[in-house]
Amino acid sequence: MNRISAITCAAMCLFFSCGAAAQEADNQKGVLSETVLLGEKEPETEQLLIQKETGNKTTASGTSDETEEWTPAGKPPASQILTVAMECDFAPYNWEQNTAENGAVPIHYEDSYAFGYDVLVAQKICETYGWQLEILKFNWDALVPAVVSGTVDCAIAGQSVTDDRLSYVDFTQPYYRASIVAVTREGSDYADAQTLSDLTGASCSSQENTVWYDECLQQIADAKIKEATEDIKEMFDGLDKEEYDIVVTDEPTALAACEEYPGLKILDFSGTDDDFEMADEEVNVAISVKKGDTKLKNQINAVLAKMTAQERTELMSRVIESQPYTIN
């Protein structure tokens, strides 16, 4: 009996010690899965469920399990990470590719890379402060919620500055001004349009939750507005397949599309008295940060302020020429 009891006791001790060791190992992993449910007010998605995965690390906005908030004076430690949300499907601002060609950056949790104008801007910011760049891929409607929830530090994703978005996030100064244009097919009834009035009666579409769809299409007289598309690829696929006569977008996106779809034509009415009427903030593309994060906002603004108009134009031309697939 004493031998059996001794064996039993030894087994129980082994069981509990293994359990404690396993618990300790889990604690040291420093990985927490947290489900964030946003409220009903979010303009770009309703009740979006985001699976937030955070490690025991310090992000550029200063959140950490163990590290106090850093100060912006001088360069932060090399361990600093700037987490950036992108759609990775919005050429030429950002897109997904299979290789690191042209200096593309790995997409976190994905076996692929991100590149485009937004990536170059993000790299410039990180190089200035000595941060590591971490890109996370989100659907267009999930970009603002990702910033609001703190899943990422910021979104650099070709976002225009709208009143709806400003009620949930703060924006930096613009990092690109994207004029509004229409795109049609060569040889269509609207291919020779010189002014906005020449588009009267056209069937049209654009991407959902954009000023292109919500405001620009409404300015076309007697427009036959079709259902909004989920993304850029679907928008131009529909135009190419003659599902509608025109789409409205910004100039960089249109230039990228014409590289992918040779039969398309850009209609630019800028400089005329009959053009799309847009407020400056709606054609200015800026970086969204969490509301109240003035420290990160000011640091990003300091970098953007040093970028000249010529430098921005050259960066945009570079990515349009180098992208392996204009629209994924």
Image: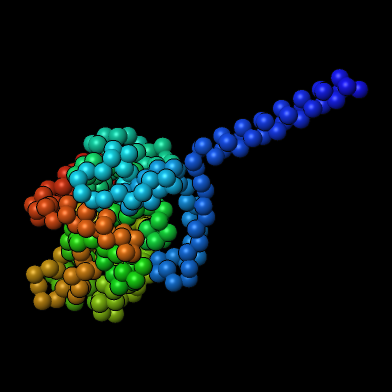
Q: Which residue is depicted at the point 34% across and 60% down?
A: 290
Residue appearing at x 86%, y 19% in the figure: 3
Q: Is residue 199 left or right of residue 98?
A: left
**Residue under the point 73% across and 29% down:** 13
- 167 or 78: nearer the eye? 78
Question: Residue 156 occupies which quadrant of the picture?
Answer: bottom left
Residue furthest front as drawn? 2
**Quarter where residue 5 is shown:** top right
Task: Tell which residue pokes out farthest to the right in this image.
Answer: 1
320 relative to 284, above or below: above
Residue sitting nearer the eye, 234 or 168: 168
Residue at image coords 51%, 37%: 29
Is residue 326 shown above or below 14? below
The answer to whether residue 19 shows anywhere in this view is yes
Image coordinates of residue 234 in percent, x first then y, are 37, 56
Label count reads 0
- Rendered image quadrant of residue 43: bottom left
Between residue 137 and residue 217, name the one nearer to us. Answer: 137
Extreme top residue here? 3
Q: Nearer the viewer, residue 299 or 91?
A: 299
What color scheme is it? rainbow
**The N terminus lies in quadrant:** top right
Residue 109, placed above or below residue 46: above
Q: Is residue 86 visible?
A: no
**Which percent across, then down, holds residue 98?**
35, 36
